């Protein structure tokens, strides 16, 4: 009887170790997926920011178009408001 109990304990220990290994494998897979998703989100944010900067801006007072990188209206001198 004690030999049978010992064998069962060993089986349970092996199952527990296998479960831990599987969890670690899943965790590393999930970690990789998470890293890819975060990189994708970063790229989307950067692309959106770049697209926003490329959109023409117009003066809210006179309607003149602001040149890229300009902070003041070339027509009336008003400050660009974001």
Image: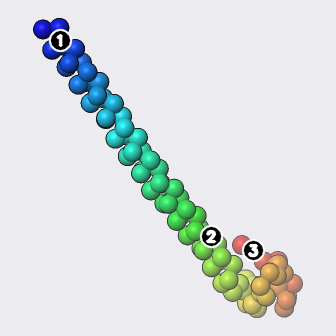
User: Which numbered disc, 3 or 2, marks the residue that appears first in the sequence?
Assistant: 2
Instruction: Count neighbours of disc 1 (C-alpha within 10 A) and say few if under 14, some if 14 to 19, many if 20 or more.
Output: few
Residue depth check, mark 3 versus mark 1: number of the one nearer the observer: 1
Determine the residue located farthest toward the front in the rendered image: 3
Distance from disc 3 to disc 1, alpha carbons, whole Å, reads: 81 Å
Q: Which residue is mark 3?
A: 81
Decide which of 27, 54 is in the foreground and name it.
Answer: 27
Disc 1 element: helix
Q: What x and y, as percent, mark residue 44?
A: 55, 70
Tag shown at residue 32: none
Kindly indicate whether the residue at mark 1 contacts the one at mark 2 (C-beta within 8 angstroms).
no
Q: What x and y, as percent, mark residue 8?
A: 19, 19
Q: Residue at x 76, y 91 (%)?
A: 64
Horizontal side of residue 54 vs 71, given as left or right: left
Image quadrant occupied by the C terminus: bottom right
Tag shown at residue 3: 1
Image quadrant occupied by the N terminus: top left
Q: Is residue 35 above or below residue 71?
A: above
Q: Is residue 34 above or below residue 22?
A: below
Instruction: Count neighbours of disc 2 (C-alpha within 10 A) and say few if under 14, some if 14 to 19, many if 20 or more.
Output: few
Q: Quadrant of residue 71?
A: bottom right
Q: Residue at x 26, y 30 (%)?
A: 15
Q: Which residue is mark 2?
A: 46
């Amino acid at each position: 009887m004690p030999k049978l109990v010992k064998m069962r304990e060993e089986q349970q220990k092996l199952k527990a170790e296998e479960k831990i290994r599987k969890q670690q494998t899943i965790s590393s897979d999930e970690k990789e997926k998470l890293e890819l998703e975060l990189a994708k989100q970063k790229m989307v944010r950067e692309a959106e920011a770049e697209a926003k900067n490329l959109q023409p801006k117009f003066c809210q007072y006179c309607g003149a178009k602001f040149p890229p990188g300009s902070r003041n209206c070339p027509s009336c001198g008003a400050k660009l408001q974001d």
